Image: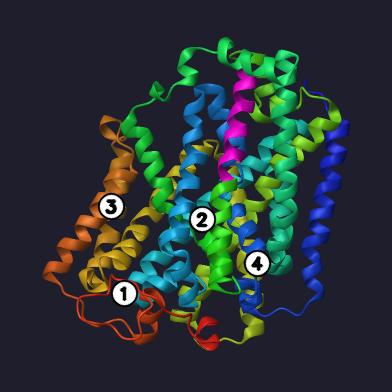
Amino acid sequence: MMQLHAVPIAILIAYVVLTLVVANVVLRRRLGADHFLAAGRQLPMFMVLVIILGDWLGGGATIGVSQRGYTEGIVAWLYPISIGISLFALAFTMAARFRRMGAVTVPEVMGRLFDEKTRLASSIFIALAYFTLGITQIIAGGALLTSLLGVDKWLADLLSALVFLLIVVAGGLHSIALVNFIQCIVIFAGMACALFFSLRLIGGSAIEGLRMLVHGLPPSFWSFGSISPVTWSGEVLSTVFACFAAQAAVTGIFAAKDTKAAVGGTWIASALIIPIGVVYVLVGMCARVHFGSELPYGLTAGPAMILELNPVVAGIALCGILAAVISTGPLCFLAPTQIIMRDIYSVYINRHESDSRMLLLSRLLSAALIAAGLIIGILLYDLLKAIFWAFTLRCGIAVLLLSAAYLGARRVSEDGAFFSLVLGFIVMIVWSVLGSPYGIHIAIPTIVSVFVGAVVITVFRKRRAPLSQETHQAFYLRQTPAAGDEGRTGAGADLSAKQANG
């Protein structure tokens, strides 16, 4: 029978209580729907940074990669490295454009670039993707609590979901930003403790521990050849492209006080995300050396290894993992809430809803999504596969955004955008059902089908309406569109304060 770990549990409980106190500080302020969904567009650079990190950390970059490190080795590094690359690309290409658009959601941007049916399709795909990611965070939090408490999976998942619920409902994006600032500090402290003391445990010192990893594991653990290059290249592509339609991360950009804060926060996040994932992969590899091929009590590699450490160290390290999960989970449920309220409810159900009722409905919807995610999460186990599937859902939207930015909006028509998204979704489903033939990751045929579909359909169904002057100015930094040069960029200033604030 699994023993309870009193000291780590006490540290973790104290940390969760502190997190909830900080989250509920926001309740003392009078919030409107814009503050709940976009923090009033007043976030400084460091807050933008922690929102972006919050989206990309979580169970996948901690528990997920440590488990893959345990089973496959350094091939698990591909996940954090591809996230870093994707954020670098986002900062370089789209971060300033997103902020200047003055939107709240990625589908809202799609609607301005194309039309309302494309906005609706984007809303459905991104909301579904983030709901899936939210479920994986409930699972990750539950896995950690199962490790500590020795309780059934359903109860651990329930406790994880309750923490998410209390943070989101408290104050929306304001609450999440405050919480994530603390989480990032705890994450770095936790990962340092986890790796340093895990290496000491298996080798007597950190240096000897590294030698044990090199010499005590099969050569395949130090090779990227353990899986097909076609498969891992698809995983990298899906992560990179998904970043451009990452509603939760882009929320930080939309909510930035200016373009400098938006771009700067994204740059810094791209540099910080890689070492976090790399460290947790090494922790999983330490678990392989320490435990062999059988983990105790059915635990995942990261928590199992950490619980072998000194109780105080284990408590700090587990807080680091929990911080990553808490920083991501609430965002994953806020993102579909933003989309449903902004892109579906406000467009198709009630365009003139009062601010107070929008706030109430946003909170109720967040709670309902978390409850539904809990029910599904209790039945779901495979973390990283679910994450990559959710990423693929967003890839087609990223293809259209980049095509509009660099080929020019006139080369991707409204019908081209909409029907290529539908085509990409069908291809993704078919490819999944076929079991990814020839080891080709589902992201590759999805990306290709959306791009080719958009270009071909546009040849036969031309764009019906040019971009509005405001949208063109925000997306291309030109005052008026010149024929044929929508894809070029030039020097310019932000939109007026009124436009930038939606």
Question: Where is residue 267 drawn, in percent x and y?
Answer: 54, 56
- Residue 262 vs 154, above or below: the answer is below
Question: Where is residue 10 drawn, in percent x and y?
Answer: 88, 39
Q: Do the residues labelled 2 and 1 touch (CB within 8 Å)?
A: no
Range covered by the magenta-colored residues = 273-288
Q: Are marks 3 and 1 in contact (CB under 8 Å)?
A: no
**Spatial separation of the CA atoms under disc 3 and disc 1:** 21 Å
Q: Residue at the spot x=48%, y=59% of the render?
A: 91
Q: For the residue marked with disc 3, what is the amino acid?
A: Ile
Q: How crowded is mark 1: few (under 14 residues within 10 Å), some or many (20 or more)?
A: many
**Spatial separation of the CA atoms under disc 2 and disc 3:** 19 Å
Disc on the earlier residue, 4 or 1:
1
- Residue 19 vs 318, above or below: the answer is below
Q: Residue at the spot x=62%, y=33% of the render?
A: 279
Is residue 34 magenta-colored?
A: no
**Spatial separation of the CA atoms under disc 2 and disc 1:** 22 Å
* Magenta residues, dominant SS class: helix
Judging depth in this view, the residue of 35 and 339 nearest the camera is 35
Reading the image, the residue beneath label 4 is 173
Reading the image, the residue beneath label 2 is 130
Reading the image, the residue beneath label 1 is 114
Residue 229: which quarter of the image? top left
Question: Where is residue 63 drawn, in percent x and y?
Answer: 62, 35
Give the side of residue 455 with respect to residue 93, left or right. Answer: left
Is residue 282 magenta-colored?
A: yes
Q: Is mark 3 on a helix, strand or loop?
A: helix
Residue 379 seen in render: yes
Disc on the earlier residue, 3 or 4:
4
